[in-house]
């Protein structure tokens, strides 16, 4: 089990309230999820990622970065290790090219599931695996399915949404029969332009203003738990819980769509 947060905004913006100052900010949540943290953001089209094995609630680097980062796209994660040791290679968010990925959940029966799941990966991507986690392999399965549809660095929101839905469906079909516990695959992904999140097996909340006539918003944020706690900061809207098996997509024009995970794009 872990906790995650992601935001996408029209203009660069800070996330100190959600990560640091809110009464249920990610720093607070890390007291129960102490096995490292990661923070990713974009400078232009280039992702920057900082990861640490220290608990976020006791790490001055987390405090400094949470106060410093001002970006249009941000993704953050605090880990409670379930599969894979506490190590930098197993710390979220994972990065490959422009893509960042974070996972809240676990795949039960991992000893049986690991080899057949790795067999589903594009061979060239499989060779790039660094750690031991189920999360990293789910990320590379998404990239494998996206690569079948388009260039990984020029994805459309339709291609990315279809690849994410297929990834969750394939993981479910492979893993769930191996255990009496269902897989939990609540994922968050971004390439800096697009942002996607899905809820399956863990909670997921969203904060955004109402879309305009063309479906666009000024900002959108997703989180495992409401990080604001008492009240959102000025200019932000309360987080609301999404239904199970929801898919959130935000395209390069900040057009927001929330729909069932397993429907045609």
Image: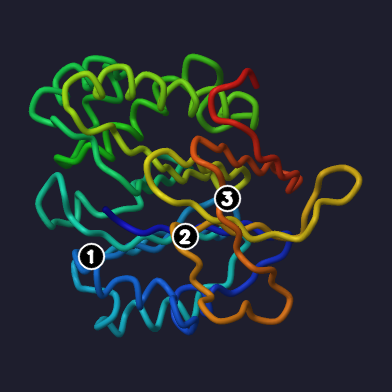
Corner quadrant of residue 31: bottom left
Q: Residue furthest right?
A: 213
Q: Is residue 160 above or below residue 91?
A: above
Sequence-wise, which precedes: disc 2 or disc 1? 2
Q: Is residue 68 above or below residue 87?
A: below
Q: Position of residue 52 (x, y in %)?
A: 24, 67
Q: In front here: 207 or 159?
A: 207
Q: In front here: 208 or 130?
A: 208
The residue depicted at 17 percent of the width and 54 percent of the height is 81
Q: Position of residue 12 (x, y in %)?
A: 66, 67
Cα gap from disc 2 to disc 1, whole angstroms? 15 Å
Q: Position of residue 186 (x, y in %)?
A: 41, 42
The residue depicted at 44 percent of the width and 76 percent of the height is 24
Labelled disc at residue 45: 3
Q: Secondary structure beneath disc 2?
A: strand
Q: Is residue 151 above or below residue 86?
A: above
Give the quarter of the figure containing the C terminus: top right
Corner quadrant of residue 153: top right
Q: In front here: 239 or 49?
A: 239
Corner quadrant of residue 219: bottom right
Q: Secondary structure beneath disc 3?
A: loop
Cα gap from disc 1 to disc 3, whole angstroms? 26 Å
- Asked if the residues shown at circle 1 and circle 3 are in contact, with their CB atoms under 8 angstroms apart, the answer is no
Label 1 sits on residue:
36
Cα gap from disc 3 to disc 2, whole angstroms? 20 Å
Q: Secondary structure beneath disc 1?
A: loop
Horizontal arrangement in the rendering, residue 74 relative to residue 157 (left or right): left
Model colouring: rainbow
Label 2 sits on residue:
5
The residue depicted at 52 percent of the width and 45 percent of the height is 190
Horizontal arrangement in the rendering, residue 3 relative to residue 9 (left or right): left
Q: Is residue 202 above or below residue 73?
A: above
């Amino acid at each position: 089990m872990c906790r995650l947060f992601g935001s996408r905004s029209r203009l660069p913006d800070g996330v100190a309230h959600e990560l640091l100052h809110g009464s249920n900010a990610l720093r607070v949540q890390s007291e129960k999820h102490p096995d490292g943290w990661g923070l990713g953001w974009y400078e232009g089209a280039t992702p920057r990622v900082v990861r640490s094995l220290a608990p976020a609630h006791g790490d001055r680097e987390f405090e400094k970065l949470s106060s410093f980062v001002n970006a249009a796209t941000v993704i953050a994660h605090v880990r409670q290790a379930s599969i894979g040791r506490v190590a930098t290679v197993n710390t979220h968010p994972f990065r490959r090219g422009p893509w960042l990925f974070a996972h809240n959940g676990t795949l039960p029966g991992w000893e049986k599931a690991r080899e057949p799941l790795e067999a589903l990966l594009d061979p060239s991507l499989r060779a790039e695996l660094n750690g031991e986690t189920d999360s990293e392999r789910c990320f590379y399965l998404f990239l494998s399915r996206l690569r079948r549809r388009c260039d990984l660095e020029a994805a459309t929101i339709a291609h990315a949404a279809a690849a994410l839905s297929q990834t969750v469906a394939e993981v479910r079909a492979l893993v769930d029969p191996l255990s009496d516990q269902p897989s939990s695959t609540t994922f968050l992904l971004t390439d800096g332009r697009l942002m996607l999140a899905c809820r399956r097996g863990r909670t997921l909340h969203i904060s955004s203003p109402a879309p305009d006539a063309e479906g666009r918003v000024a900002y959108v944020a997703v989180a495992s738990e409401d990080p604001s706690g008492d009240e959102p900061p000025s200019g932000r809207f309360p987080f609301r819980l999404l239904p199970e098996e929801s898919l959130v997509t935000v395209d390069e024009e900040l057009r927001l769509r929330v729909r069932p995970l397993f429907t045609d794009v």
